[in-house]
Amino acid sequence: MYKIICHWSRLDWNFPEVVMKQEYETNQIWKKAMPASVKVDLQGQFYVSVPRWSHGIPATMNRIVVKEGKPLLEAFPSWDWNTAGQVDVLQSVLGYEIDEYNRMWLLDQGKMAYEPSAEGSQKLVIWDLNTNKLIDSIVIPSEIAPYRTSFLNDLVVDNKNGFVYITDSGCGHQDHPLRGGIIIYNMSTKTLRRVLDQHFSTQDFPNFHFQIDYKPVFKDKPLRIGADGIALSADRSTLYYCQATGRNLYAIHTGLLRNEQMPLEQINGAVQVLGSKGTTTDGMHADNRGNLFYTMLEGKGIGFFDARDRSFHKFVSDDRMLWVDGVAFDQKGSIIFNSNRLHEMFGDDDIDWSNPYNLIIWKAYVGKDAKSYLYG
């Protein structure tokens, strides 16, 4: 039903220069190099984002290459395009999407090591995987995603109607009030709009605490993350989302979001609470048949929501699935997802770096006709 595609004790790169590898090893940068989201393109090439939540991460966007039988990361689209401190190229990517036209939509958080985003660093970069060329780069300004508090998390793409929906977790600085929200990008007008700003559904659930393996997560300073996971129904009519520190699933009709004249108050009042997933969730992805797959942090695996009867189900679970992050579809009826031990890597827990299964990319079969929402 499910299997491991590849795994690491710690991430390693196919470095172009020996000095880069030496710096990576000497400074133990690998201790904060975390694979955040995994996706596969139409040619079957796997990609992995590694956000720069700590200084020194070699490349934030990568593809997986195999050298001497070992899976390594290689900067994508190039090493130059991953130059830290150069705002017009990729600074820190967490969420991204590969659409039905084989275009990659990269959401650049801009900020590194939780420092304020530099002007021009927050952006939506569109890359054509067929021609390996830049299509467009849209800057997301501070009035849409505040440079201090923004934490651009994930996105979904609606090419049929010409919109992109983005979650801003609003947790860009632990000492500032959280400011979650949803950002809408209109492809035809190239304009951005922020909605559901600090709405209860995009904020962290008050006083929320959770455990993984009966251990409190970030016990000394509990996690506070607003809007995080996001998914779009195959008919493009419903946007689903959730906060990371909370268990509820929320939904809103996209017709309201596509109408730029719609009052913010009316959008606020249209949010539906679909119920509890029974687990905290990071990544989500809808299929072409009315199911919404979501990561189960507490449940150590993947669950799914059946939109037809509004029911929640467990799909797959494994004790090695520690902090399941991104989830996506391949072109062969399976979901792919990764577990990265985020709560331990950025918490107070000690990691056994000799464990070959610290970081894992998984595959689980759904059905021969199961595909991403993009093909609905």
Image (cartoon, grey):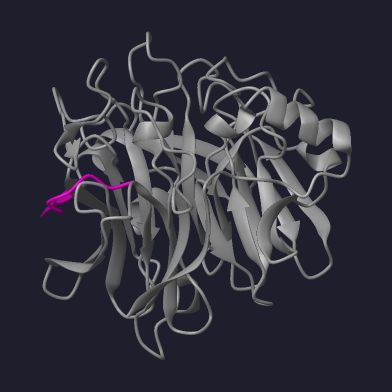
Residue 123 occupies quadrant: top right
* Residue found 48% across the figure and 50% down from its top: 155
Q: Position of residue 224 (x, y in %)?
A: 29, 25
Q: Nearer the viewer, residue 23 or 144?
A: 23
* Residue found 39% across the figure and 42% down from its top: 341
In the rendered view of the protein, which quadrant contains the C terminus? bottom left
Residue 369 appears in view: yes
In the rendered view of the protein, which quadrant contains the N terminus? bottom left
Q: Nearer the viewer, residue 92 or 302?
A: 302
Query: Up-down: is 177 above or below 274?
Result: above
Q: Nearer the viewer, residue 338 or 264?
A: 338
In magenta segment, residue 324: no
Q: Position of residue 211 (x, y in %)?
A: 17, 36
Query: Up-down: is 38 above or below 216?
Result: below
* Residue found 86% across the figure and 39% down from its top: 80
* Residue found 59% across the figure and 24% down from its top: 111
Q: Nearer the viewer, residue 336 or 10?
A: 10
Residue 195 appears in view: no
Query: Up-down: is 172 above or below 288?
Result: above
In magenta segment, residue 278: yes
Q: Residue furthest front?
A: 354
Classify residue 267 as left or right of residue 12. left
Labels in figure, total: 0
Q: Position of residue 54 (x, y in %)?
A: 58, 24
Query: Up-down: is 144 above or below 176?
Result: below
Q: Position of residue 19 (x, y in %)?
A: 86, 31
Classify residue 79 as left or right of residue 153. right
Classify residue 292 as left or right of residue 176. left
Identify the magenta region.
272-282
